[in-house]
Image (spheres, grey):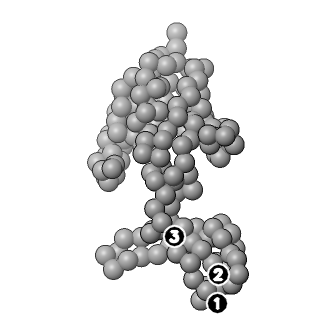
Amino acid sequence: MSQRIAKNKVVSVTYQVHDEQGLLLERYDFPVSYVHGVDSELFEKIEQALEGRTVGDTVQVTLTPAEGFGEHRPELTFTDDLDNVPHEYRRIGAEVMFQNDRGETITMTVTRIRDGKLTVDGNHPFAGKTVVFTVKVEDVRDATPQELAEARAGASRRPTRH
């Protein structure tokens, strides 16, 4: 008999993310695991939809920007003259790390090069989008004491979600 997803179970899932029009945005065919109910990095709405499910079950969850990747924040988008940008960053998809005066870092991605200008964006690529997750349960098992300790330690180091 297959175990049901509940608190303190290690759950392995594969998933796909589509936009509202059905365009595939991301796909993970290799199982990703987390400890259920221990403040995982999994979106809360997805974790709730998985509660009580077993191996082989599939759930589909729609996340608005507020529930998922947040609204697109224009203040995290910057454009500069291409001449001011080092050559290694002059390609779409290049990632650049910036650090502020407080030592906080942000990774920005080159999203546009046009008319002698280059644009970098610090928003998540899915920010501002309503997305649909299709999640398949691949495995469910009891977490070991070490996995529980690591999950709780990781949760205490993560910043509070807003």
Structural distance between the alpha carbons of marks 2 and 1: 8 Å
Question: Residue shown at 43%/42% (left/top)?
Answer: 67
Mark 3: which secondary structure? strand
Question: Which numbered disc flags the more N-terminal residue, 2 or 3?
Answer: 3
Mark 2 vs 3: CB contact within 8 A? no
**For residue 38, what is the image quadrant?**
top left
Residue 14 in the image: x percent, y percent? 60, 34
Q: Quadrant of residue 32?
A: top right
Instruction: From the viewer's side, name the closer residue of 25 and 65.
Output: 65
Dot 2 or dot 1: first in sequence order is: 1
Residue name at image x 35 percent, y 75 percent: 103
Secondary structure under tag 2 reads strand
Q: Give whichever of discs 1 and 3 has the lower sequence position.
A: 3
- Can residue 25 be seen at all in this image of the molecule? yes
**Which mark lies nearer to you, 1 or 3?**
3
Image coordinates for residue 159, horizontal then vertical, percent: 32, 54
Amino acid type at circle 1 is: Asp
Q: Relative to residue 87, is residue 47 drawn left or right?
A: left
- What is the distance, in whole Å, between disc 2 and disc 3 at their CAs? 13 Å
Res. 15 image quadrant? top right
Numbered mark located on residue 117 in the image: 2
Establish if 89 lies above or below 107.
below
**Residue that label 1 marks:** 83
- Left or right, 34 with reference to 22: left
Check residue 77 in the rendering and tell me which mark sits there, or answer none: 3
- Residue shown at the point (59%, 89%) measured from the top left: 84
